[in-house]
Image: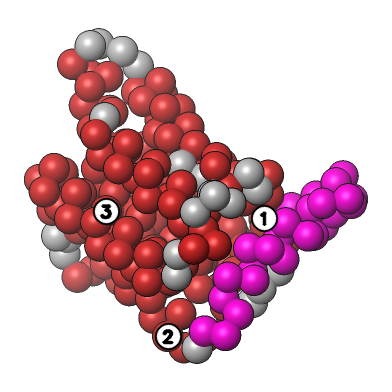
Amino acid sequence: MIAFAIALVLWTLMFSPWTAPYLPFWPCMVGSAVILIVLALYNGRKSIKEHLFVPLKQWLIDILLGVAIAAVLWGVFWIGDKVSQWMFPSFARHQVDGIYGIKDGINPVLLSCLLLLVIGPAEELFWRGYIQQSLIHRAHAKTKPEWIAVIVAVAAYTLVHIFSFNFMLIMAAAVCGVVWCGLYWLCPKHFPAIVISHALWDAAVFIWFPI
């Protein structure tokens, strides 16, 4: 899929040790998020529109659900951090600190706004609203079970981080992929809640309540 290949190239440029030191991370991340939004809205606008254009009452419910999902996911990662430091004492904390290092010197208010309003929503519109939905449609067309499409969607979301060579980042993407892809598969009508949870979790775990 061309869209996945584009995302893989963008994430490799931002995270790989061969290219990341020479690129400004946050401008690249915002630019990549904009590209993902354009790809998602151009290719998957019909399904995205169906999921996001919902009555106000459902939006209010989805806001509460999104907050709850983000809080639970933060708790999962807090526990996961403790477990990973016990299992991998030689590198777990070092790799996590390396991820947090990319925010050094950047205004936290600005980063919070970018994560909440651009980066988090862009990833959900692209990975769930477009990529996963497209995979599910293909599964239907080939009379394959939907769970295969979900597994492929989780794998795709995880693999774009592979060239960071950061085991903790890759595992974090895998866990988030399982949660958000699973929720989208089981409750597609609550897609706004998933978008909100992603945006809130990004800001919470990275800026407001770092682990």
Query: Is residue 52 one of those drawn in magenta?
Result: no
User: Mark number for residue 36?
Assistant: 3
* Element assignment for label 3: helix
- Amino acid under disc 2: Leu
Name the magenta segment's main secondary structure: helix
Between marks 1 and 3, how big is the CA–CA gap?
A: 27 Å
What residue lies at 19% left-to-right and 49% top-to-bottom? 39
Q: Which residue in the structure is indicated by mark 1?
A: 76
Residue beneath the point at 39% across and 81% down: 113
Depth check, front residue: 101 or 145: 101
Residue at the (64%, 71%) spot, across then down? 101
User: Which of the 4 image quadrants contains residue 7?
Assistant: top left
* Residue drawn at the location 64% of the way across and 77% of the way down: 209
Is residue 103 in the magenta section? yes
- The quarter in which the N terminus is drawn is top left
- First along the sequence among labels 1 and 3: 3
Vertical relation: 209 (above or below) 86:
below
Mark 2 residue crowding within 10 angstroms, few (<14) / some (14–19) / many (20+): few
Give the SS element for disc 1. helix
Please provide percent x and percent y for residue 4: 32, 37
Crowding at dot 3, Cα within 10 Å, few <14 / some 14-19 / many 20+, comes out as many
**What range of the chain is rendered magenta?**
80-106
In the image, is residue 34 above or below residue 173? Answer: below
Q: Which residue is mark 2?
A: 110
**Which of label 1 and label 3 is nearer to you?**
3
Q: Position of residue 186 (x, y in %)?
A: 39, 38
The kind of residue tagged 3 is Leu
Pick the residue in front: 21 or 143: 21
Mark 2 or mark 1, which is nearer the start of the sequence?
Answer: 1
Of residues 196 and 106, the one drawn nearer to the viewer in this rendering: 106
Mark 1, residues whose alpha carbon is within 10 Å: few (<14), some, or many (≥20)?
Answer: few
Q: Position of residue 129 (x, y in %)?
A: 26, 46
